[in-house]
Amino acid sequence: MNHQIAVITGGAQGIGKVTAQILRQNGWQPILLDRDEEAGREAVEAAPDLIFIPCDVAEEQSVRGAIAAVLAQFGRIDGLVNNAGFGINKSIEELTLEEWNRVIGVNLTGA
């Protein structure tokens, strides 16, 4: 079957995982990108037709590698869900520069 291909960042859990389920129900082939490899394996075990590719959206080479893998297998990407994101439960005064850069790297640069 010739499904449309959807890449979902942060796709192995939470909103991304539910989005993948909805896309599957509507005839899409979801490709889950997530830095949590255990969650990715669990998602595929629960729904073997899903495809998981480990990826940290804050790391350019990780994203390039993941996209290259999708294109090598399917030749195209028809949809993208920029879902990856997180926060640190601290006031801005308490955040270290490293923590700030990590949040910005995932939530802004990674999108």
Image: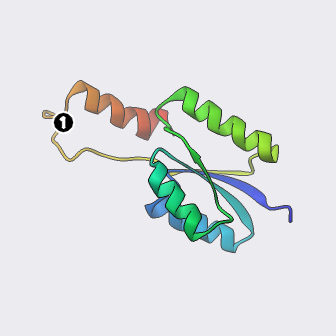
Of residues 58 and 45, the one drawn nearer to the viewer in this rendering: 45
Q: Position of residue 26 (x, y in %)?
A: 71, 72
Residue found 41% across the figure and 47% down from its top: 85
Q: Is residue 84 left or right of residue 95?
A: right
Q: Is residue 98 left or right of residue 10?
A: left
* Residue 75 image-quadrant placement: top right
Of residues 65 and 41, the one drawn nearer to the viewer in this rendering: 41
Secondary structure type for disc 1? loop
Residue found 33% across the figure and 28% down from its top: 101
Q: Is residue 96 left or right of residue 86?
A: left
Q: Is residue 17 left or right of residue 78?
A: left
Q: Position of residue 33 (x, y in %)?
A: 56, 48
Of residues 91 and 39, the one drawn nearer to the viewer in this rendering: 39
- Rendered position, 89 above or below 109: below
Residue found 75% across the figure and 69% down from its top: 27
Color style of the picture:
rainbow
Q: Position of residue 20 (x, y in %)?
A: 59, 63
Residue type at mark 1: give it. Answer: Ile
Residue position marked by numbered label 1 in the rendering:
92
